[in-house]
Image (cartoon, coloured by chain):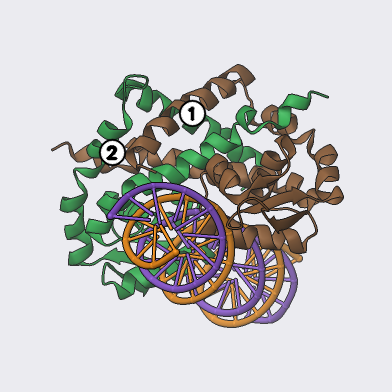
Chain colours: A brown, B green, C purple, D orange
Amino acid sequence: MDETQLLLGNQLCFPVYSASKLITKAYKPHLDRLGVTYPQYLVLLVLWEQDLQTIHEIKQKLLLDTNTLSPMLKRMEKMELLHRKRSKTDERSVIIMLTAQGKNLRKQALQIPEQLMTSMACEDMNQAGLIQLRDTLSVLIQQLQKIVNK
Amino acid sequence: MDETQLLLGNQLCFPVYSASKLITKAYKPHLDRLGVTYPQYLVLLVLWEQDLQTIHEIKQKLLLDTNTLSPMLKRMEKMELLHRKRSKTDERSVIIMLTAQGKNLRKQALQIPEQLMTSMACEDMNQAGLIQLRDTLSVLIQQLQKIVNK
DNA sequence: TGCGATTTTATCGTGCACGATTCAAATATA
DNA sequence: TATATTTGAATCGTGCACGATAAAATCGCA
């Protein structure tokens, strides 16, 4: 048995875990100006792309469960970013719809991705490298989803 | 302004965030056998590598703050995985020391990294690709730490 | 030596994550 | 039609994350 397998520096899980937390932290000053948290920002990205989606659809796209989304969407409703209403055709489903305020935040958010990409790039990692990293992670995610059989 | 910047599929942040959650989920069945959570496993990795470290040292290595580590280490003390004692030379510092049980868990953990690497690899992403991904993320983390000026 | 600044840890409050459970609506099946 | 199964949300409990604050010990420097 290879004893070096357990060294922190040899793990893949730790860089992914740390990078995720650090990216969230890097987003924070930008998202503070919008008054939303990072997971709330992800919900807005999904709704800006297409308004009027069920909780189930949002859940599929963000890989989040309803026990996370339900309370979060209620907080966002209280913040008057969105409305929640039962579907007419299927009373089980709840449809999420942006308010005018929720739609307006999009304008303020437009510059965030570019600012982040710029600040994350450096001499050892240009923007092309970041995009390649994104695509590499997407491949990993596909494989991980098979493992955890969602 | 490029309107496609806000599409979920164009973000780097989302794949990192999802990959992190999915990796944690992929570890769960293995860590359940050890009776620890994923962040607790990270603490054990650090302590297996070198026993008798202060909370400050663990904090530096895992990029976690004391408001996360303090309660977590107390839970792990209650689980009898480790002891906490004040440093003789600096009464501010708390030194963390593994119990026999905490040390013994290492044997059960030895095979976890290899099992995970095997299950994460696939035809579109071999183990060499995973290692390269790890190193790419490490570069990104260096840059992110500068941004969030820890 | 004395005292302000820094370091180290702990605590509090809020917001995710997520396993487990519950419930109602819709669908499948006998 | 009646019953069983599935589906979509919500709720509960536990454990992170983390900003803000506090408290004690140490350090730096006049």
Q: Chain of mark 1?
A: A
Side of B128 where B145 appears, left or right = right
Against B94, residue B5 (above or below) is above
Q: Is residue B118 above or below residue A35?
A: above
Name which residue type carries label 2: Leu
Q: Determine the secondary structure under disc 2.
A: helix
Q: Where is B89 relative to B5, above or below?
A: below
Question: Looking at the rendering, which quadrant does residue B120 occupy?
Answer: top left
- On screen, residue B112 above or below A76: above
Mark 2 Cα shell of 10 Å, populated few (<14), some (14-19), many (≥20): some
Q: Which residue is mark 2?
A: B116
- The amino acid at mark 1 is Ser
Label 2 close to label 1 by CB (< 8 Å) = no
Taking the spot 29% from the left edge, 65% from the top edge, the residue there is B97
Q: Nearer the viewer, residue A39 or A64?
A: A64
Can residue B87 be seen in this snapshot?
no
Determine the image quadrant of residue B4.
Answer: top right
- Residue furthest out toward the left: A1
Res. B31 in view: yes
Q: Is residue B78 left or right of residue A44?
A: left
Give the structural element (helix, strand or loop) at label 1.
helix
* Marks 2 and 1 share the same chain: no
Rendered location of residue B107, percent (x, y): 15, 51
**Foreground label between 2 and 1:** 1
**Residue A63 on image: x %, y %:** 51, 44
- The residue carrying mark 1 is A138
Q: How many marks?
A: 2
Check the residue under mark 2 and report the chain it is in.
B
In this view, the residue in front, B127 or B102, is B127
Q: Residue at x 32, y 75 (%)?
A: B78
